[in-house]
Image (cartoon, rainbow, N blue to C red):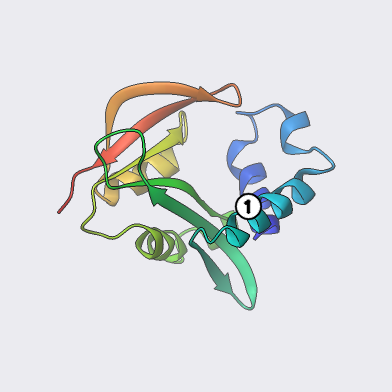
Amino acid sequence: MALAHVRSWRETYRGLLPPDVLDAPDAVARRVEFWAGLLAAGRPAAVAERGGEIVGVALAAPCVDGPWQVQLHILYVVAAAHGSGAGPGLLQAVVDPGASAVLWVADPNPRAQAFYRKSGFTADGATGTELGMRVIRMVRPSA
């Protein structure tokens, strides 16, 4: 999980985040600790596999900051698995298709934003920053 997470981060955010953040020597170890802690706490997560290798990870939780039922916190798929169905499968695994949902996505990140629009999310105008990177909020009403 940690390897797929870091690999996808590096592929997605190269040019948006400083190289020292993406290429930190302890990046994988920090993600191992992150995922181990979440899983030990019983947080539900999903993985996508191809050929016995994890190529994507996702994590959502009940929303605590707004009127939505669930917040998507993580959905990363390595570039080699883009277009394979891993992204939609991961989204459906962690976010009930009928639930209202919210997420924050890097801006610019046209590929991810298009994926979320195709999945029923729309940008609502809210913006923020994460790790110094601009992010926009996207929301989806309940079905």
Bin the neighbour count of mark 1 within 10 Å (Cα to Cα): few under 14, some 14-19, many 20 and up.
Answer: many
- Tell which of 100 and 22 is nearer to you: 100
Horizontally, residue 121 falls left or right of residue 130, namely left
Horizontally, residue 128 falls left or right of residue 118, namely right
Under tag 1, what secondary structure?
Answer: helix
- Tell which of 86 and 26 is nearer to you: 26
* The image quarter in which residue 112 lies: top left
Relative image position of residue 129 (x, y in whole percent): 51, 22
Horizontally, residue 104 falls left or right of residue 77, namely left
Residue type marked 1: His
| Residue plotted at (63% across, 52% down) | 5
Q: Total number of numbered labels?
A: 1
Relative image position of residue 118 (x, y in whole percent): 28, 50
| Residue plotted at (33% across, 23% down) | 126
| Residue plotted at (39% across, 58% down) | 91
Q: Which quarter shows the C terminus? A: bottom left
Relative image position of residue 54 (x, y in whole percent): 62, 67
Q: On the image, numbered disc 1 is attached to which residue?
A: 5
Q: Which quarter shows the N terminus? A: bottom right
Relative image position of residue 50 (x, y in whole percent): 58, 74
Residue pushed farthest bottom? 51
* 118 is higher (above) or lower (below) than 80: above
* 76 is higher (above) or lower (below) than 124: below
Residue pushed farthest right? 25
